[in-house]
Image: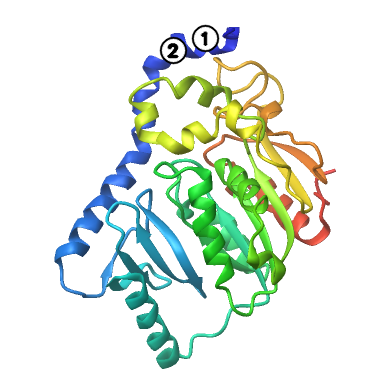
Amino acid sequence: MISNGTCRILRHVRILPFVAFLPAFGALSDMATANQAATWPNLAMPTLGGRQLWADRYFHAGWRIQENVLTGHARLLDPSDIRRCWGPYDACRAAFERIRAERDIPPNGKHLVVLLHGLGRSRASFKGLQRALAEAGHEVAAIGYPSTRRDLAANAAVLEDLLADLPGVERISFVTHSLGGLLVRELLARDSDWRGRIAVDSLVMIAPPNRGSAMADVLQYVPPINLLLWRGLFCATTRHATGLPVPDVPFGIVAAGRSGTGYNPFLDGDDDLIVRVAETSLDGAADWLQVRGLHAVVMNAPQTVQAVLDFLEFRRFEHQN
């Protein structure tokens, strides 16, 4: 039976197609980059850093090798997102090893904080949080994955390989936004070789649809939104999200809302415009915190940033309770 809240969403979906097209601009830009890479000579050139058509396959000290989900070719980006090589993955890896030796690029630190973005977003969405973490002395890897083009299982498989190839790293902490939290739940449920070498210190999930999203339940049937957000949207539905295992590491949850009626008049209860506060909860959390804010920007809000810093150090939201 369809709930009253779902009916209200369906009656007002006419306002949503414009919103759904927003992540497509980044995807179209990356499509152009992929086409150029197939015909242009191998010259150093600026890129957008990878959006919905690129998956990070390798990371080292800000350098990364990405794979295009449509063409299958790879490219090597430096910390400024300048393309230094493109072609087969092995060729990009060999190019990085040469550059690494020439420039004496330092090894990875022992503790790495991995940031994973939400649906339709990119690693650039963590700009404020990433800067704060670096200023606090953390080594940070903001990882990009094609959230709309691949499902959680496929993205987790690529992330497994990336984590297995991090020489020098002994501990990892994850900080996620929205769908990124579900991706880590999928990742940690796997019997991965990297878990035997790297300890997972903690996980902070920001605005995660841990119980599934009422918005996703409705929008999966609404074109063109379901075509644009595609696989990631289906993974955020109640049916899929509730089947994911609880993380086996200390984790905290930061929910966003308005402390009363939410920002979205078509959702029941408090919400951040996209995810309801009640949908973020998950049994076994070491701590839970609600902050005031909108879904799209809450990860960089000062209160959220402080909560993340606290949890990485104390395994609880020390300054918030």
Identify the image quadrant of the N terminus. top right
Give amino acid for label 2: His
- Expressed as whole percent of the image width and height from the top left, the position of residue 182 reads 61, 42
Instruction: Give the residue at x 18% y 60%.
Output: 36
Circle 1 residue: 8
CA distance separating discs 1 and 2: 6 Å
In the rendered image of this protein, does residue 34 appear above or below residue 28? below
* Discs 1, 2 touching: Cβ within 8 Å: yes
Please name whichever residue, 265 or 36, is drawn nearer the observer in this view of the structure.
36
- Expressed as whole percent of the image width and height from the top left, the position of residue 11 reads 45, 8
Classify residue 81 as left or right of residue 35.
Answer: right
Please name whichever residue, 182 or 77, is drawn nearer the observer in this view of the structure.
182
- Expressed as whole percent of the image width and height from the top left, the position of residue 248 reads 76, 51
Instruction: Give the residue at x 57% y 9%.
Output: 2
Classify residue 312 as left or right of residue 272.
Answer: right
- Expressed as whole percent of the image width and height from the top left, the position of residue 55 reads 42, 57
Give amino acid for label 1: Arg
Circle 2 residue: 12
Identify the image quadrant of the C terminus. top right
Q: Which quarter of the figure has residue 226?
A: top left
Secondary-structure class at tag 2: loop
Please name whichever residue, 307 or 57, is drawn nearer the observer in this view of the structure.
57
Instruction: Give the residue at x 33% y 47%.
Output: 26
Secondary-structure class at tag 1: helix
In the rendered image of this protein, does residue 113 appear above or below residue 22? below
Report how many numbered discs are placed on residues in the image.
2
Instruction: Give the residue at x 55% y 33%.
Output: 236
For mark 2, does the 10 Å Cα neighbourhood hold few (<14), some (14 to 19), or many (20 or more) residues? few
